[in-house]
Amino acid sequence: DQQVKQNSPSLSVQEGRISILNCDYTNSMFDYFLWYKKYPAEGPTFLISISSIKDKNEDGRFTVFLNKSAKHLSLHIVPSQPGDSAVYFCAASDDNYGQNFVFGPGTRLSVLP
Amino acid sequence: NAGVMQNPRHLVRRRGQEARLRCSPMKGHSHVYWYRQLPEEGLKFMVYLQKENIIDESGMPKERFSAEFPKEGPSILRIQQVVRGDSAAYFCASSPYGINTEAFFGQGTRLTVV
């Protein structure tokens, strides 16, 4: 049973436009959410996080929105740049879940010049 | 401050051999996580360790896999009697506190079983 879902395996966006990556989760105990970006042959790198006490967190071109009632979060990248092309993983953690992170399957973003 | 260091980057083993994957966490980090990424899949949690302790190994296969994080030295993920299905990228991550903090990942070890 997949606790963290990213239903879009891939997404293509034109350079300069907004990229929206979605993530849904099923475990209502999750209270901390992270986004990681991964380039081929490299480890994931942390991008941005959000705690369940917030509904929005912004860092430069990246904004994460959390809708707890819908168990949904999204990552907005604006404006999108070709260097943003990567696989984006959504991850969630719960203090009561062994303090580990549960990752979604990832969404491959392609930003077209 | 060097990042999370994993070695080797690539490891080839024949079926039945042992694979040892090493992970040196970032300086000051005492929490280590191991993840496995199978081809075309996301990152699957395997085990979470603090120094000398296994905190959560719910993602570890029951047989052939073990992990340790000794007081001194790197964390080791050990796979005995490897099989073709063990071929994957294994990522290690570390964090300073473990609770609601981002983890920093190494570049991974790509294990190929031939």
Image (spheres, rainbow, N blue to C red):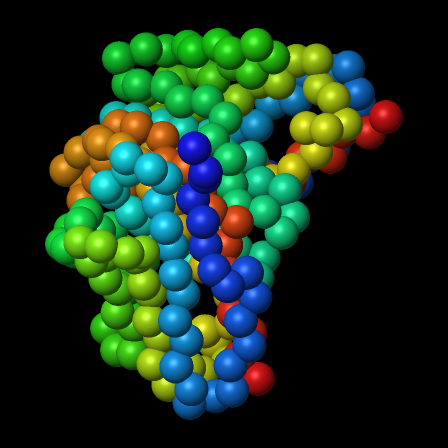
User: Does the image show residue A24?
Assistant: no
Asked which quadrant contains residue A38, the reply is: top right
Q: Locate residue A29, reporting x and y percent.
A: 21, 32
Q: Which residue is drawn at 45% across and 73% down?
A: B86
Number of numbered callouts drawn: 0
Q: Is residue A22 above or below residue B40?
A: above
Q: In this view, does B42 lie above or below A14?
A: below
Q: In the figure, is residue B45 to the left or right of B42?
A: left
In the picture as drawn, the residue positioned furthest to the bottom comes out as B16
Q: Which residue is drawn at 37% across and 19% down?
A: A50
Q: Locate residue A81, reporting x and y percent.
A: 74, 22
Q: Which residue is drawn at 45% across and 15% down?
A: A65
In this view, the residue in front, A88 or B23, is B23
Asked which quadrant contains residue A62, the reply is: top right
In this view, the residue in front, B86 or A92, is B86
Q: Which residue is drawn at 68% across and 28% down?
A: A84
User: Does the image show residue B68?
Assistant: yes
In this view, the residue in front, B43 or A66, is B43
On-image quarter of the C terminus of chain B = bottom right
On-image quarter of the N terminus of chain B = top left
Q: Locate residue B97, reporting x and y percent.
A: 22, 32
Q: Is residue A56 above or below residue B73?
A: above
Q: Locate residue B105, reporting x and y percent.
A: 44, 43
In this view, the residue in front, A63 or B31, is B31
